[in-house]
Amino acid sequence: MSVEEKLKKMARNMNGHVPEAARLAAEVFPEMLEEHSREGAFAMPAEGGALDEETRTLIYLGIALATNSKACIEAKINRAITLGIPKDKIIETFKIARFAEASRVYGNAEIIFRYLKEEDVK
């Protein structure tokens, strides 16, 4: 598939949008666009995967939220729109990602809780 065909396919899959990184890579480093596409197909095969496309999109969106990847958030929201994923599922994905991030902070506070537990702390 040519670079132009890959970009058109991305646009079809993402509600008419192509991530700016993909557009720029196509111009200056087309091999990277090819590699990224290959990795995407490996991670999320069109056929034979254990998860359906909606579930994959929501997992990816949650991870993008938790890792602060704005380009991926935009790409996956556009994919969710294309797939017709209901808003309540997107909101639940947000809630899960938010809770995972809060749980990270909570877990990191173990050191603080140990300190506060010591009897000599005033």
Image (tube, rainbow, N blue to C red):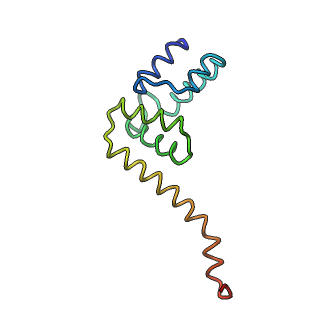
Nearest the viewer among 31 and 7 is: 7
Please, is residue 12 above or below residue 96 in the view? Answer: above
Q: Position of residue 9 (x, y in %)?
A: 45, 19
Q: Can you say whether 29 is above or below 113 in the image?
A: above
1 in relation to 95, above or below: above
Residue farthest to the right, as pictured: 120
Q: Is residue 121 left or right of residue 36?
A: right
Q: Nearer the viewer, residue 43 or 117?
A: 117
Q: Residue at x 65, y 88 (%)?
A: 119
Residue 71, percent from left and from top = 54, 34
Picture quarter containing residue 25? top right
Q: Quadrant of residue 109?
A: bottom right
Quarter where residue 81 is shown: top left
**Which residue is found at the position 41% from the left and 28% from the top?**
47
Relative side of 24 to 14, left or right: right
Quadrant location, the C terminus: bottom right
Percent x, y of residue 46: 43, 27
Q: Residue at x 47, y 22 (%)?
A: 10
Is 30 left, or right, of 82 in this rendering? right
